[in-house]
Image (spheres, rainbow, N blue to C red):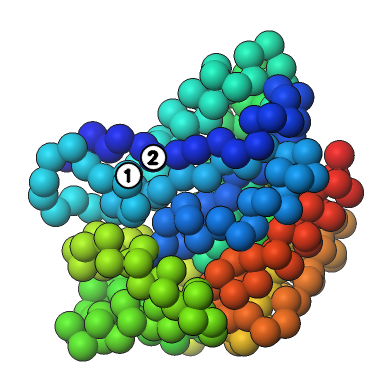
């Protein structure tokens, strides 16, 4: 059963007018849209509109009826279709949307998978929506086969209660600033244990490990539009696969930018929101 969700979202920078490019940023597991609050001002001041939303079971995007439900990326994509349709009707009537899509951690994964859907791309052409670029922040790369410690346990649902609690607490401390950790705790406290567990299981299904006997499959990028890869300097785990994606993109002639932000942990938007905003602004300007 798919629960009815009241999608919580907001468009910032409406003062920039209906021809302004739209940057849609999606938060990570256990987060919410406020994780981008220090990123938004730089982008709106540069003339962009910013779309933020709470992913289902996070923040204020909660089911209308109580219960424990699965977390599926397909459901998240359907939520996003509805949000984008409403934003187009309300704020871009009779105008094309020049869309940049991206996010933090899980939000990056969602943006890549969402943008890769061929049927959706055809509908965007009909609805006058042009995908101009992808922005990945501290991202796990869907379908890329690299070794990732612990994710196999979520994929096989063999995580112990102690291991889950460690994973939950690790999200909070993956920011290196007091401001960031306070925001991370505030957001994750709104997510039930069941919802977060199902969320992590769903993520794990897109993060395969190489088979010991078989050679890793060649990775085919999910999109060929320009891509920005932002790596926090104190997040060694996602750095490996983001650098690998950057290498693959360049080999395939895909325009790929890789930037490292100093003094930041995995929750880079909470640690260095201004720098994320600046690098995102510069990338988007280069694509228009």
Q: Is residue 47 above or below residue 185?
A: above
**How far from the left and from the top, in percent, is residue 159?**
24, 81
Q: Residue furthest top?
A: 94
Residue at left 54%, top 19%? 90
Above or below for 126 versus 239: above
Distance from disc 2 to disc 1, alpha carbons, whole Å, reads 5 Å
Q: Position of residue 274 (x, y in %)?
A: 70, 64
Image quarter for residue 122?
Answer: top right
Mark 2 residue crowding within 10 angstroms, few (<14) / some (14–19) / many (20+): some
Residue 214 shows in this picture: no
Residues at discs 2 and 1 in contact (Cβ within 8 Å): yes
Read off the residue under disc 2.
8
Is 200 drawn above or below residue 57 in the view shown?
below
Query: Where is mark 1, residue-wise?
Result: 61
Q: Nearer the viewer, residue 147 or 104?
A: 104
Eyeballing the image, is 41 above or below 234? above
């Amino acid at each position: 059963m798919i629960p009815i969700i009241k999608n919580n979202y907001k468009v910032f920078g409406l003062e920039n007018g209906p021809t302004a490019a739209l940057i849609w940023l999606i938060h990570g597991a256990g987060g919410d849209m406020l994780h981008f609050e220090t990123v938004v001002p730089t982008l709106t001041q540069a003339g962009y509109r910013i779309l933020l939303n709470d992913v289902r079971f996070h923040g204020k995007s909660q089911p209308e009826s109580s219960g424990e439900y699965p977390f599926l990326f397909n459901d998240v994509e359907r939520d996003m279709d509805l949000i984008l349709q409403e934003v187009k009707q309300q704020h871009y009537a009779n105008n094309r949307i020049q869309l940049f899509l991206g996010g933090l951690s899980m939000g990056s994964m969602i943006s890549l998978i969402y943008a890769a859907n061929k049927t959706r791309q055809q509908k965007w052409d009909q609805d006058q929506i042009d995908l101009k670029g992808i922005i990945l922040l501290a991202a796990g790369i869907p379908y890329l086969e690299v070794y990732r410690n612990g994710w196999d346990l979520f994929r096989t649902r063999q995580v112990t209660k102690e291991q889950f609690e460690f994973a939950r607490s690790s999200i909070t401390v993956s920011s290196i600033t007091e401001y960031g950790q306070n925001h991370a705790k505030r957001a994750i406290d709104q997510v039930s244990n069941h919802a977060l567990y199902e969320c992590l299981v769903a993520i794990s299904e897109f993060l395969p490990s190489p088979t010991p006997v078989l050679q890793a499959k060649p990775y085919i990028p999910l999109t060929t539009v320009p891509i920005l890869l932002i790596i926090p300097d104190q997040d060694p785990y996602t750095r490996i696969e983001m650098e690998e994606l950057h290498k693959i993109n360049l080999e395939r002639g895909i325009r790929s930018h890789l930037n490292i932000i100093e003094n930041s942990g995995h929750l880079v938007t909470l640690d260095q929101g201004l720098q994320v905003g600046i690098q995102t602004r510069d990338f988007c300007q280069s694509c228009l």
